[in-house]
Image (cartoon, grey):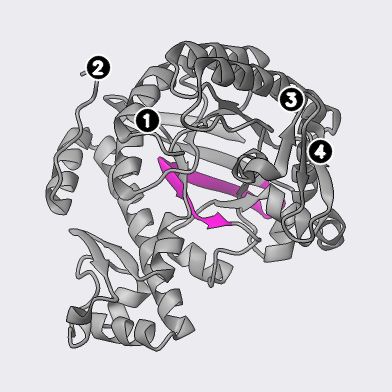
Amino acid sequence: MKYELDKTNGLARRGRLIFQRPQGEFKVETPAFMPVGTYGTVKGMTPEEVRATGAEILLGNTFHLWLRPGQEVMRKHGDLHDFMQWHRPILTDSGGFQVFSLGKLRKITEEGVQFQNPINGERIFLSPEKSMEIQYDLGSDIVMIFDECTPYPATFDYAKKSMEMSLRWAQRSRAYFDELGNKNALFGIVQGGTFEELRKISAEGLVNIGFDGYAIGGLAVGEPKEEMHRILEFTTPLLPADNPRYLMGVGKPEDLVEGVRRGIDMFDCVMPTRNARNGHLFVTDGIVKIRNAKYKDDTSPLDPHCDCYTCKHYTKSYLYHLDKCGEILGARLNTIHNLRYYQRLMAEIRTAIEQDRFDDFVTEFYARIGKDVPPLQKA
């Protein structure tokens, strides 16, 4: 993987990731949003439908794909690209966040994490080396190091110990990734909770090890938005300008805008797909909750500014009807729309950076959704 940085506008960056795959060269224009395909599928979507929304890269989940279908099935198909028939780039998370979310079902040691398989209850073990091996079998174009996602709130002492162990795991991940002869990209993950001092140690330690890109983890885990913005503003300048920066698990449309304002290049989140299945739809001027009875007779499109399949063909009334009847098509059409909304938002952001008017875009974006522009703390 190669990263090209074309232009900056304030802290916002316009560039691209370039991947060499068996099918040829693939470019991912940045800032980019990655739809989440946890089990080797973006829920309810074919790969062609996902691509039609503008997505150029997907996220797969190492932890869940390891449990089901498992490495042997994956190897029989070739890799995750062959298994799910998405022959464009894929980033896989390391399993660290899923282990974090298991709570009391897990036991963390220096070696790795012992936990109870949520499917059948058996005890299994995940280590930095095992995570690298699984992601190698998945054929991930971007592999994430195995880390511990520091919970919120956490004491300074807990966050320090967690961050230091994640740094040691980062070193082990790097070593085993290289030992496997993996020619794809490996990203480090900055941890340290809400403590700037710890974030600095983590970022500098990762840069010292050397990675193809750097993620900021342990955010959007319950901390106030102001805290997330503060840590982002502090951490992003510590990362090399010639590598991509990835904010993990974020987020709402305004979170993407705020991330780009602070120098982030890559995002992922289940929000557009999960919210779509719950009738919560993102539109140019905010949100449509399609389950609201006021849409029963509404013959207008979901978003007159949207060019997605759903908005070009169907009315709010029809989407309301599908949801009321529990029809699968409703969830699919909603998902197509929300994914397209996110990709259109990223395209607008990229154009605004190219044209040196990103600040104006931010002002217009917040005016459309009826919110105030959050201050940049170092402005």
Residue indicated by mark 1: 228
Determine which residue is flagged by label 2: 378
- Residues packed near mark 4 inside 10 Å, few (<14), some (14 to 19) or many (20 plus): some
In the image, which residues are magenta?
21-37
Task: Say which of 315 and 356 sits in front.
Answer: 315
Please identify the dominant SS of the magenta region.
Answer: strand
Residue with the mark numbered 3: 174
Foreground mark, 2 or 3, reads 2
Q: Quadrant of the C terminus?
A: top left
The residue singled out by tag 4 in the image is 130
The label nearer to you, 3 versus 4, is 4
Judged left or right of residue 230, residue 270 is right
Q: Position of residue 229 (x, y in %)?
A: 33, 28
In which image quadrant can residue 334 be found? bottom left
Q: CA distance from mark 2 to mark 3?
A: 34 Å
Q: Amino acid at mark 2?
A: Lys
- Whether residue 142 can be seen here: no
In terms of sequence position, does the residue under pointer 2 or pointer 1 come before the other? 1
Q: CA distance from mark 4 to mark 1?
A: 31 Å
Please tell me which residue is depicted at 72% across the width and 56% down the height of the picture. 118
Q: Please, what secondary structure does the residue beneath circle 4 have? A: helix
Question: Of callouts 4 and 2, which one flags the residue occurring earlier in the amino acid sequence?
Answer: 4
Mark 1 and 3 residues: CB-CB less than 8 Å, in contact? no
Q: Residues within 10 Å of mark 2 (few under 14, many from 20)?
A: few
User: In this rendering, which labeled residue sits more in front, label 4 or label 1?
Assistant: 1
Q: Residues within 10 Å of mark 3 (few under 14, many from 20)?
A: many
